[in-house]
Image: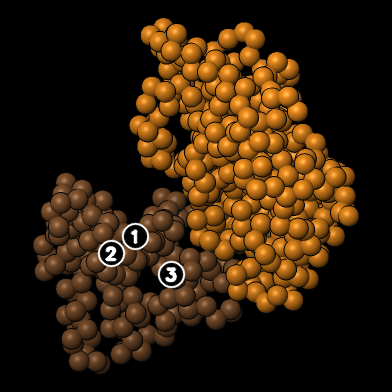
Chain colours: A orange, B brown
Amino acid sequence: MIPILDMVQGPVRWLAGDGPMGDRILSTRVRLARNIRGTRFVGRALEPELISLRDRVLDLGLSISALPGANAMPVGDLAVMDRQLLLERHLISHDLTGDSAVRGLVLAGDEKVSLMVNEEDHVRIQALAPGFQLEAVFEAAQKVDLELEAHLSFAATPELGYLTACPTNVGTGMRASVLVHLPALVLTQQIKKILAGVNQVGLTVRGFYGEGSEVVGNFFQISNQTTLGLSETETLTKLSRVVNQILEWEDRAQENALRDARLQVEDTVLRALGVLKYSRLLRSEEVVGLLSAVRFGHTLGLRNVPSVSVLNDLLLRCQPAHLQRAAGREMTAEERNAYRAELVQKVLEVRDAPRFDP
Amino acid sequence: MKCQNCGESESTIHFKEVVEGNLREIHLCEACARDKGFHIAIEHNKLSIAGQFIWMAENLYPESAAKVGSVQCATCGLRYSQFTRIGRLGCPDCYGAFQPQLMQILRRVHGETTHRGRLPRETTALAEPETPAAVTPPPRPEDVRKQRLRQLRRELEAAVASEAFEEAARLRDSIRALESEPPGEPG
C-alpha cells in the first residue's frame, strides 16, 4: 500500500476556506513548466529515457526542502480510481490520469506543492493554496524551482526564456490561476460580457478542473493566457488587478440583486439548502450548483447557512472517486447518488429527514 | 448572418481570403463548413490557438506551406509539418530550427517574441549573445534569388498573421513573379 493514498483521504488543504477572500475565491494555483536541456520533449523521447528522467526527478523530489514530507511515485503504479482521486483534489492534471508508464508525481506532505513528471513537459511544478494569494503561491513554486535548478539543467535561452513542448507556454512557463465564485454576475447575465473582456487582455477563463473543463456552479478559473513578454511579477500583477476588478463588479451585481430582488435571491438560496438537506438522490453536477447557491447566501450575509469550510468540504467529498474511497467500494452512478445524498445529510447534521421504517 | 451555402442556418465559421487582390469573406454554418471540407479548421479551432493560426497560414498559401513543412530539426528529426499536426515541438532545439515560423506563432499567441522573466542561473551566466539559429547561406549568385524569395515568404507569413491581406496579396504576386524568372538571373 502506498502511503499517499492514506494521506489523501482527509480534507484537502487548498479547500480549507480560510484563505484571503475565502468565501469568494476558492483557491490560487501557480504552475511552472520546465524541460531538461539536451533531452527530447516528452512526446518525442524514448520510453527508457523518460523513465530514467522520471526516477531521477522522483528521487530529487524526496530530498528537496521546499517539498517537506514528500511522497514520490510513478503514476502508472496507481489504480485508475486513485488517479481520479488525485485529479479531484487538483493534484494531478487530466493528462496525468491517462495510462502511461513514464509519468510520475511528487507530492509535498501538505499537498500544497507538487511535481508532475513527464506530463506535457518534463517537469511541472504546481503550488496551490486556499483563497486569493498569488504572491505566496508563486513564491512556494519558485522555491522548488530554485532548488531543482541546482540539480537539473533546464532548457532555456535568454531570448525565449524557458523552452516548453508547446509554444503557448514558452517564456516564463508560468500559468497562474484563480478559482473564483461569481454567482451574481451569472444571475444578472453580465458574465459573458466580462469574460469576453478578460480574453482581450491576455487572460483566459476555464472551468473547475482547468483546461477543457465545463464551468459548473458559477466557479470560474481565471488565468494568464500568455507567457512571453511579461515577467512573472508583471503577469501576476495583471492577473491580480483583473480579478480584483471582476470582484468589484460581482459586489455591485450582488448589491443590485439584493436591492431589486431580495426575496427571489433568498428563495433561491433556501431552496438549494432544502434540496441538499432533504434529497435521497443527488447528482454530482447538481450538488456543485446547489453548494454554489448556498455559498452565495453566505457571501450575501444570510445567517444560519453552513460555513464556507463545510461547503468546500462537501464540494470535495461529493466527487465520484472521493465517494467511492469513503464507501470502500466501487459504485454505480445511481448508488453514488444515494450515497452522496446521505453524506450531505450527515455533514449538514440533518436528523429529521422522513424515512420508511427499516 | 445566414450561411452563404444553405442560406438557412446561422453562420458560425468565418473565413477571409484574398483572390487576385480582392478580399473575399466566407460565412458558413458548421454543417456546410464540414461539407466544404473546412472541418479541419473546426477541429483545430477546438484544439489550440496555435494550431488554428498554423492551419490558416498553411491553407491560405499551400504552396509555401509545403516547403516550410519539410524543414527538419537536426537534433530530433521533427519536421515542421509534424509540428503543425500535433502542436508540440520535439526538443528544445526545435525552437532554433523552426525559428521564422515560430516567431509568427509566438507573436500571434503572446503578442510578443521576447522573454522578460527570470532565467535559470546557468542560462543567465551564458547570456552573452548566442549565434542566431538560422545561419545565413554563403552568398552564391543563384542563392540571392532564393534568399529574396525566403525573405518575401517570411513577410508574406507576417502579413497573413497580422491579417494585412492586401499587403499579403501584393507579396504573393512578387513571389510568383520571382519564381517564374529563370534561375541564375536575379532581378
The quarter of the rendered structure image containing the C terminus of chain B is bottom left
Q: Mark 3 or mark 2, which is nearer the start of the sequence?
A: 2
The tag on residue A29 is none
Judging depth in this view, the residue of B47 and A199 nearest the camera is B47
Q: Is residue B156 visible?
A: no
Q: Residues within 10 Å of mark 2 (few under 14, many from 20)?
A: some
Residue marked by disc 1 = B42
Asked whether the residues under the numbered discs 3 and 1 touch, taking CB atoms below 8 Å apart as contact, a structural biologist would say no
**Dot 1 amino acid type:** Ile
Of all chains, the one bearing label 1 is B
Residue at the location (19% across, 62% down)? B17
Residue at the location (11% across, 69% down)? B20
Residue marked by disc 3 = B84
In the image, is residue A125 above or below residue A274? below
Q: Do marks 3 and 1 share a subunit?
A: yes
Residue marked by disc 2 = B34
Judging depth in this view, the residue of A19 and A300 nearest the camera is A300
Q: Position of residue B164 (x, y in %)?
A: 23, 57
Which of pointers 2 and 3 indicates the residue nearer the eye?
Answer: 2
Q: State the CA–CA distance, disc 3 to disc 1.
A: 15 Å
Q: Mark 1 or mark 3, which is nearer the start of the sequence?
A: 1
Q: Residues within 10 Å of mark 3 (few under 14, many from 20)?
A: some
Q: Residues within 10 Å of mark 1 (few under 14, many from 20)?
A: some
Q: State the CA–CA distance, disc 2 to disc 3.
A: 20 Å
| Mark 2 residue element | helix
Asked whether the residues under the numbered discs 2 and 1 touch, taking CB atoms below 8 Å apart as contact, a structural biologist would say yes
Q: State the CA–CA distance, disc 2 to disc 1.
A: 8 Å
Which of pointers 2 and 1 indicates the residue nearer the eye?
Answer: 2
Judging depth in this view, the residue of B27 and B62 nearest the camera is B27
Left or right: A283 with respect to A328?
left
Q: Is residue A301 visible?
A: yes
